[in-house]
Image (spheres, rainbow, N blue to C red):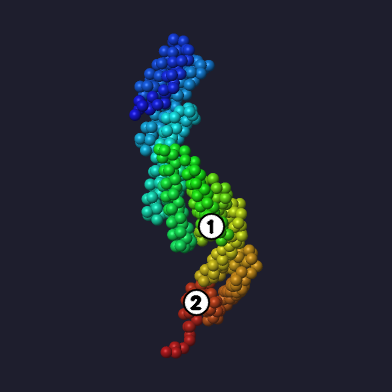
Amino acid sequence: MKTRLAYAVLPLVIAACQSNGAGAEDSTHLTRIDELSANGLYADALLAAEAYHQAHPDDPEGELQWRRAKAAVMLEQARLLCFQEQNLEALNLVREAKLVEPGERVIADWEQKLQRKLAEIHSVNGDEFFSSSNLEAAREQYETALTYAPDDARAQASLAQVLLQLNYRRGMGQQYYEDGVHLLRDYWLEQAKTRFDYTGKYQPKNDRARSRGQEVSTQLSAQRCTLASDLERQGLWAAARNEYRIALLLDREFADAKSGLERTRIEADAEDTLREIDRMMRNKQWDKARAAIEAGLALTKFQADKFEGAKAGIEEAILETSYQTALTMESDQDFEDAVAAYDELLAKRDYYKDALARRDTLKTYVEKAAGLYQQAKDVTDPAEKLKVLRQIVLFWPEYKDVQELINLLKPAATEGKPDRR
């Protein structure tokens, strides 16, 4: 395999070197490069070619030899990466080699081979996710497969099936799903038959069959676009996006499907952003939610009202959180801090639920408790002092050290009183 690869990349180099009219010494040097390449010593061949090219920068054959030697080294590295299952890295290296030597057929063959391999890997991954009902992951894998092999009918059919299932999960209905499956299944079978017909031994250029297949594709794509447009009008952006995706699987050049997919992709992303904003609000991540709202407003063209509603919702949620905090302090008889919390809330909005009334009541409690406490301090008679402190307990049992003072005053206040047992 290794030697065959070298000969596949470099055969034209040998022919070119034999007819370039170079001097005897130069021809010997070039022939040596050919021999190194033919024996699979690509790195050595590249070093020799670089040395010759630097010594003879104006020699076109030297430059050609250097480019082909460089491409051969890169292709050999890509081949080893492929065998190590580092397929994406191998593909990237092959594409770099293609830039160095764009006309070499063996490089193009390796690019196609790696693209097919990667497409197959991602399709298999998609099948596994599909079988476990992880539809979004399956969709991503099939779409990735189609980036490597856009005409892969298996990946196209599988992706269409996933998109139909996703829409079914979004409430599109059983009939929608069944009709879509039957229609697309018949289409893929027809496509397979048409492709077989015009690639047959006796019909290598069956333009009529190809044209017929394209007409069917365009008609079906238009049908899916009509359905997608209706879903858009209902505000079902993700479902519409999936229908436009199916339309483009049927006809990759259908303009309405392209523009519709871009439009609904943006709005479906905006929907996802709204759901993320809702999560942030539940977690009281106000600043993150505000930033997400601004990003969403810059993104959407049809859902600005929802983002504005979310913005208002944040302010309402902040007020409600402040209100609940103040209520908790009030329940814990932390009246002074509760008053401060209600003040902070009312500074943001003059009237919010019963916050004003609660704040005023608690202020009365705080002022009354302070006054009675001072009165109790000023009174010398234990019984009178006890009576005053007990007035505080009626509305604020945990005020300062009132309970401790009452416990201390009880014996003194009862001295000298007759035993009523």
Of the pair 225 and 211, the residue shown nearer to us: 211
Q: Quadrant of the N terminus?
A: top left
Q: Is residue 36 left or right of residue 230?
A: left
Describe residue 363's horizontal placement relative to residue 19 as left or right: right
Q: Residue at x 54, y 59 (%)?
A: 231
Nearer to us in this view, 143 or 152: 152
Q: Name which of mark 1 and mark 2 comes first in the sequence.
A: 1
Q: Nearer the viewer, mark 1 or mark 2?
A: 1
**Residue 412 vertical placement versus 156 (above, below):** below
Q: Is residue 108 left or right of residue 348?
A: left
Residue reaching furthest to the front: 202
SS under mark 2: helix
How crowded is the residue under tag 2: few (<14 C-alpha within 10 Å), some, or many (20+)?
Answer: some
Q: Are marks 1 and 2 in contact (CB under 8 Å)?
A: no
Which residue, as the protein is rendered here, is positioned at the far right? 350
Residue carrying label 1:
227
Quadrant where the image shows the C terminus:
bottom left
Q: Is residue 381 visible?
A: no
> What SS does tag 1 mark?
helix
Label 1 is placed on what type of residue? Leu
Q: Which residue is mark 2?
A: 406
Residue 42 location (% of width, % of height): 39, 24
Residue 253 visible in the displayed image: yes
Rendered location of residue 402, percent (x, y): 52, 74
Residue 79 % position (x, y): 38, 32
**Looking at numbered disc 2 in the image, what kind of residue is underneath it?**
Ile
Question: Whole-percent x and y of residue 91?
Answer: 43, 36
Establish if 61 lies above or below 326: above
Q: Residue at (44%, 21%) from the top-left corner?
A: 13
* Within-10-Å neighbours for mark 1: few <14, some 14–19, many 20+: some
